[in-house]
Image: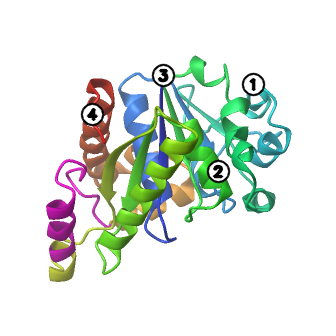
Amino acid sequence: MLAFTVVALKGGVGKTTVTLGLAESAARRGLRVLVVDLDPQANATLGLDPPEVRFTTSDVLADARDGIAADAVTRSGWGPSVDLVPAEPALEHRNRPGDAASALRLRRALRGVADDYDLVLMDCPPSLGEITRNGLAAGTHAVVVTEPGYFALNGAEQALEAITVVRDNSNLRLRALGIVVNRMRSTVSEHKYRLRELEEAYPSLLVRPPIPERSIIQRSEGAGVPFRANGRSGAAVGAIFDKVFGELYDRAQTGVNR
């Protein structure tokens, strides 16, 4: 079982977009996917459009008994290959700093549950607080999402440092798997410059191709459907995510990571 923790240091970079794109591509490969929404904004939950929500990650982290996450697993609106542990705004109360043991609450809650899936994707809030620490402590690999802007390099560096801290303190199996650049506009010189900057700094971690900025992405998420449900434009975005997921999945399978 692989567990990808998707992290970013700031909001608005499309972290949830990457999570959903990876979920769609993994399901197309025949993998059984569990998305764990750890962001109080619950955008991944909205994008996956579950028909029913009984319990959320807020409940899971509050209880934290071994395997308790099973009670919160629900079907997504994307079909039988993608399940969800949904989020809600009340999850924000779980983001207060805690002791070292508090970072292991999600890992305990997922014990045995994650084994029923080929891939777990954890969509973390856009910060390095307590909830993200839980996500990193429960993952096998971390995926850093950034946009090609002024703070891209610094943000990626800080995220990688945080991954190293969690690995050293609470999760020795955790590895940085890749840096995914989202909302790329190839006609913007600043974007191309920042992409080269990231490539020079992290040649073994930068994932190609970058995800372009496309309005079809927002329309798909707003409708609660996979990208490929939106015609030719959606299929083109889905094909890009197939390449990104393929690169990340191959790295995880072969142990090519940091």
- In the structure shown, which secondary structural element does the residue marked by tag 3 occupy? loop
Q: Which residue is mark 2?
A: 38
Which residue: 54% across, 37% down?
171
Instruction: Please name the amino acid that badge 4 sits on.
Output: Arg
Query: Looking at the figure, which quarter contains the C terminus?
Result: top left
Which residue: 80% across, 36% down?
64
Image coordinates of residue 198 in percent, x first then y, are: 22, 65
Q: Earlier in the sequence, mark 1 or mark 3?
A: 3
Q: Earlier in the sequence, mark 2 or mark 3?
A: 3
Q: How many marks?
A: 4
- Left or right position of 31 against 133: left
Q: Which residue is mark 1?
A: 67
Query: Distance of mark 4 from mark 3, alpha carbons?
Result: 14 Å
Q: Which residue is mark 3?
A: 1
Circle 3 Cα neighbour tier, 10 Å, few/some/many (<14 / 14–19 / ≥20): few
Is 206 colored magenta in this rendering? Answer: yes
Give the residue at the far front of this rendering: 168
